[in-house]
Amino acid sequence: MKQTKKLSNKFLITMACGLMSALLVGCAGIGPVYIPGNADTYDLDVTIDTRGTTISMWTGFGSQINTVMEELLDEFEQKTGIKVDYESKGGYPNLLKAINLASTSGSFPNIANGYPDHFASYIKSNILLRLDGLIENDGKRGDTEGAYTQNGVRYGSDGIMLMDYDDFYNDYTRENETLEYKEDGTPHILGVPFNKSTEVLVYNATFFQWAASREDLRNKIFVPVTWTDVKNVGVEIINLLKPGFKTPTADGKILGSNNKWYTTTAEALAEQASIIMNLTSVDEASFRPFSYDSTANMFITLVRQYGAQFTEIDKNRAGHGYVTFNDAENKTKTTEAMTMLKDLFDSKVMGIPSVWNELYSSSPFKAYKSVMNISSTGGLSNITSAAIPVKAAPIPVKDSNQKYVISQGTSLGLFNKGTPAQRVAAWKLMIFLSQQKNGYFTSQTGYFPTGPFSYNSEDYQLYLESDMQSNTEVLQLECANLNNEIYAGADTGWTKFVDPGFRGSADIRDLVDTIPGLLMVGEPYRTVEEVLNAIYNSLSDYFKPTK
C-alpha cells in the first residue's frame, strides 16, 4: 500500500512563493518575474526612428575577436546614432548561463550570439524573438525618405542595408530553421548566421610532399580521401618510420630527404639532406599518423557519414528533441561507423588528445607525434609552427555519396525585450554584423563569410588577394578557399551540417564525447555494442516516446 506524505509547512510556503512570483507579487527576497510578450515581430514598424536608442549585446568572444567587435560597433554607432552596450561573457558556457539566469528578471540583452542548443533553451523560456516578420517587412525601410541604392544594394536612410535573407548559405540558415515550427509545419526563423567555421584535415606538408616526390612512396603515402585511405596510408607511415622509433638506435631518429636516418640535424645538412621528420622525442607508443581534436565532432560526423541520425527535433513541441543514434533504425549504421573507428585505434593509426594527455591534438602534431590532424578552422593558430609547414584538405569521408562535414560557429538572435525602437535598432545591428560588414569581420578573424554578399565584398576579396606572411595566415587563407571552392562549391557533393538544437542536446553531445575514448581503451566495455549501449541508455530521458 502506498503511504501518503503529509505536506510540511515549509513545502506549502515554497509553493505559495512560486505562485505569487508568477503573478509578479513575489515573496520576501524574490524580485518580480519577467513575463515576455509576443515573440512574433510582424507588428514591429521597421521604419521607426532609432537614432539615440541604446541597446545591449552579449557574446562569448575572447579578447582577440572583441577588438574587432568594438571597432565595428563604433562604426555602427557613428553611422546610425544607436549606442551599443557591449559585453563579452568570456566563453559560450558563461554566455548561456548568464542569459538563462537573466531570463526570469528580463535583464538579458537585446541581441547575442549563440549555438542552436542555446537558442532552444531561450525559446523554451519565450525570450527569443521570431525573425519572420522582420525579414518579411524589412523592405519597407527602402521606401523611406533618404533611402538609396549603391552598387545594386538598397540601404535605409541611416546607411544600413536591407536584409537579404536568401543570400545566406543554406547550410548556415538550416540550423535556425529547425528549432520551432508553426502549426502548418513550416519553420520559424530564430537567428541568422554570424561567425562560421568548420573542420579540415591539416597535414605535415614537408612529409607528404616528400612522399609524393618518391616513386617508391607516392602510391602508398598520400593525403587520404576516405577512411579506408586513412587506415592504409596510416599503416604505411608507421612501417616507414619504425626505424626512427627505436631508442637507442644506431641509425638515428631524424629522417632526411634522401631517406636516410641521422642522429643530428647537422649530419643530415652536411649531406645536403633536408629534415623530413624529427623523431628525437617520439617513440612508437606515442606516435599516431592521424589525430582528431574533437572527439564529439568525430563521433557526430562519422554517424552522419555512415548514414545514421544522431538526434531528432520534435516539430510539435518547441525546444524538445530526442537522441536517435542507437535506436532500432540507426543502430546498425552507427555500429558500423564505430567499428571502423575502433579498428583505426587498434591499428595505432588514430590518436585522440587523451593518448597524449592533452586537451587537443595540436601540440603532438607540432612535436612530430602525428602527421595529420582534423582541426577546427577557428583555431588554426594552435596547430601552426615555424618548424613544420602545413597544408589543408577536406576531411576524410566514408565514400563519395556521404560527404558530410560539421558546421561550427554561432548565429545572432534577438531577444524579447525593450521598446519597439530598441528591437528595430537591434535588428539593424544584426544586419550590419551578419551581412553588411561580415566580409570585414571574417577577414579579420579567420571565420567564413555568411553568404555570397559577404564573400564578394571588397574587404573579403582584399583579404583573399593579400600577401600573407605567417604560417597561420597562409593556412587560414588556404582554408578560406577550401571552404568556398570545395565545401560550399557547386556540384562538389559536400554538405555542411549541424544537428538540430533542443534543450538537452548539449548534454547529449557531452556524453557522446566519451565514446571514442572508451572504444580506444577497451575498458570497462569490451565491444563497440557495449560502449554504444552504455552511453545510449544513460540518455534515456531523451528517448523518443513509444507510440
Image (spheres, rainbow, N blue to C red):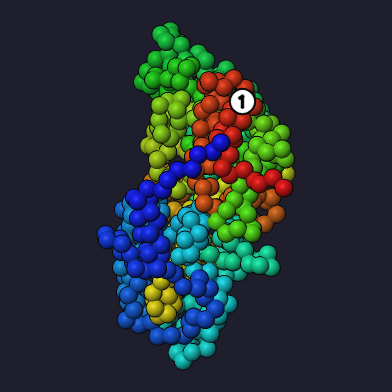
Q: Residue furthest bottom?
A: 145
Q: Going 37% across and 64% down the picture, which residue do you hit?
A: 20
Quadrant position of the N terminus in the picture: top right
Q: Residue beneath label 1, please?
A: 530
Is 153 or 217 nearer to us in this picture?
Answer: 153
Judged from this view, the residue extending furthest toward the left is 29
Residue 367, above or below 97: above
Task: Please state if 545 lies on the left or on the right of 176 as rendered.
Answer: right
Label 1 neighbour load within 10 Å: few <14, some 14-19, many 20+? some
Residue 222 visible in image: no
Considering depth in this image, is 25 or 413 the residue closer to the camera? 25
Q: What's the residue type where badge 1 is placed?
A: Glu
Could you say where residue 61 lies in the image, as x and y percent from the top left?
37, 54
Q: How many marks?
A: 1
- Disc 1 is placed on an element classified as helix
Which quarter of the picture shows residue 344? top right
Residue 347 screen position, x and y as percent: 59, 20
Is the residue 409 above or below the residue 333 in the image?
A: below
Near-viewer residue (16 or 422): 16
Q: Residue at x 50, y 73 (%)?
A: 38
User: Going 33% across and 64% down the picture, which residue do you hit?
Assistant: 26
Please provide percent x and percent y for residue 135. 55, 74
Please report the residue visible at 40 percent of the width from the left and 85 percent of the height from the top.
49
Say above or below: 176 vs 276. below
